[in-house]
Image (tube, rainbow, N blue to C red):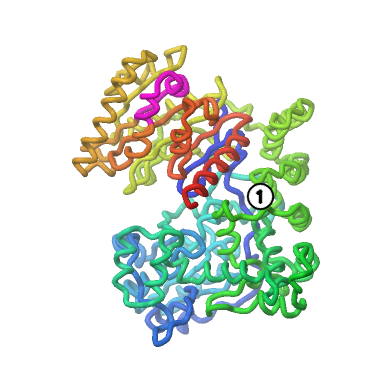
Amino acid sequence: MKPKNVSSDGNASVAVGGDVNAPIFTNPRFYLTSDVSVPDPGDWPRVRETNALSLGVHRTWNAAGAPTLPAYVERDVDVELAERAMDIISGGVLLLTGDSTSGKTRTAYNFLRRFMPNYRVYAPTPGTHLSGLPQLVQSSSDGPFLVWLDDLDGFLGRNGVDPLFVEAMQRLGVPLVCTIRDDLFDSYTGQPREVAGREGQDRWHVGNRLLRMLEPVRLERIWSPSELTRASRISDERVSEALKHSSSYGVSEYLAAGPSLMQVWRRASRVGGHARGAALVRASVDLARAGFTGGVDIEVLRDIHVRYLTNPSLRPESWEEALSWATEVMYGVSSLLVPGAYEQTWQAFDYLPDALSRDRKASLAIPNFIWEEALALNSENEGQWLIGMRAYMAGQTEYAITAWRPLAEHGYYEAASNLVAVYLEKGDAQEVRHWRRIAAQDDFYSQKLDFPGVEYDPEDGTVATGWSRRGERVKFQLHKPGDGVRHAMIVGAPGIGKSNTLSIVLLGALSSQIFTLGLLDWSHEQKHFAELREAAFLNAGNNLQESLELLAKIERAIDFRIGDGRYEVPARERPAILLAIEDAHLLFNRSVEAVRIALRILRDGRPASICLYVTIPDISLESFGGDDQLRQAFADRNNTAFFMGDAGLQMWRDLDLLRSGWEAGESG
């Protein structure tokens, strides 16, 4: 069996055979090449002397008679931060992750004010060489000190923040307080990826090694009921207004004026508005959505924005007016276009492409000329891979081929694997054979790997199921510590290794001692659970009556456990139940009752610590007994999807479309 890779996808994991969807490393916003000097540590301000805005907290809109920022609302993660405070303030690392305006920086700043008010804080600018910082700190007696690294991705590199730098600061007892966006964290911590350019490869590997050393704390974009309750006690009209929109936006997100900026942009394409400015912003937003995430030369934007101006009756303003409007700071928070890393480069305020990508119902198609421009801009850049992925996911297969072909021709075997999948979908047997020969040259596929035994990690609730191209273990999420169990589907053609993968996961669940097993083997061979049946507390073969009796017991367990109220998190004294169904599509097509109970498990099982794992050949409606509700429930982003084989890339895209269609329907 070939090892398979797993990557993060929102709150869930998606795995695709042949590395085809490992998280993608894109070009960072900054390169560590400048010679910005580090001030004397004795001159660093004390935390109590700083303010939130000076350390990067987003402004909110102005309110008459109100302070610049609303009062801080305690987030759920503050409890965890308090528990880890002693480790952090004695020289540890705090890493907060989340969406672009989820409240990471404000939460981190609140932590400083609460636990380290007398520490001297240094907030370097991206591009600062930090390799000499440990020596400077060591020679100063004016501490204690801490280093503030908001948007950590801007500092990663051999002259910036790397594992050696972190270890040196830890030896000196100097805490590092960091934030990073979820998508960038996933890009660095995903499965190893061949990226174009030596500098890009070095940066990715530095970031990958460093971030895998750290234990992140994640802030959710949408606030929890308890957070909303606490926010409702704040007497501030801005918070009150944000609460009115809390079902659609995160409170921090709304306070940071992201939605307001989005509305300003969307309303600008009208007579008497800023039609040219809106087109300029659209060009930058679409380039980011297509995979080019860095700053773009203003002259490039000037050339391409005119292609959006197809309605002369809007009477677009002058170029100078458009640029001034698009770069004007609004609501005291941000402009629609923000400065890039280099002079005369601009990029969209990151909320705009993020929000547009989330809202598939209102999303606009990316024009062909943008794909072409993105490819041209990335011709010497590791972003080529990302553009290919974005194009494929958008149904722009030809642009995906254009992006991946040169990479595959120069020895990036993952790109060759993707091309095999693309041409299989297109039905081009000759191209399939060609790229399969290229992909087969990768030594990764010819290695004979011994199974070292089950590896369950209680720290993150994962089981190691295989190896990546770089020899690193691939992990499968069983549960999230403190947050309960996950449901999962393992998908692929017969003989691809689904049963083997599931068996390893089940062994890991047993070794954790916080899971017990229920097994239903609906395969024709009746052999896949042979070694596990004795360890399972419930098991049955492909006898329909016995299977329905087992499922009924699981449903009764859900009712009991929810009523008891103590089973939300798996524990040795109250273990989770993992029900695994081999070839579940055969059962679902035999019994409507089996479909009903499976749907009940998916909807109500998590608070009872009861999860459902299935193996199926694909994600067509037939694999779910023709029941679209069951398919949508498995497709939920909180569940795990593990795709195997050449068809994995296409199924990943289909899953994304399935999720987007369901979410758009719900929001409508």
Q: Which residue is mark 1?
A: 386
Q: How many marks?
A: 1
Give residue 65's position: percent from left, percent from top: 39, 87
Q: Reply above or below: 204 against 468.
A: below
Near mark 1 (Cα within 10 A), the count class, few <14, some 14-19 or many ≥20, is many
Q: Is residue 81 visible?
A: no
Give residue 4's position: percent from left, percent from top: 55, 34
Q: Is residue 589 magenta?
A: yes
Depth order, front residue of 246/207: 246
Is residue 204 rendered to the left or right of residue 198?
Answer: left
**Could you tell me which quadrant the N terminus lies in?**
top right
Residue lying at 61% horizontally and 52% vertically, measured from the top left: 25
Q: Residue furthest left?
A: 564
Q: Reply above or below: 76 against 555.
A: below
Q: Which residues are magenta?
A: 579-598
Give residue 413's position: percent from left, percent from top: 69, 37
Residue lying at 55% horizontally and 39% vertically, measured from the top left: 655
Depth order, front residue of 623/392: 623
Residue lying at 28% horizontally and 28% vertically, measured from the top left: 554
Q: Is residue 134 magenta?
A: no
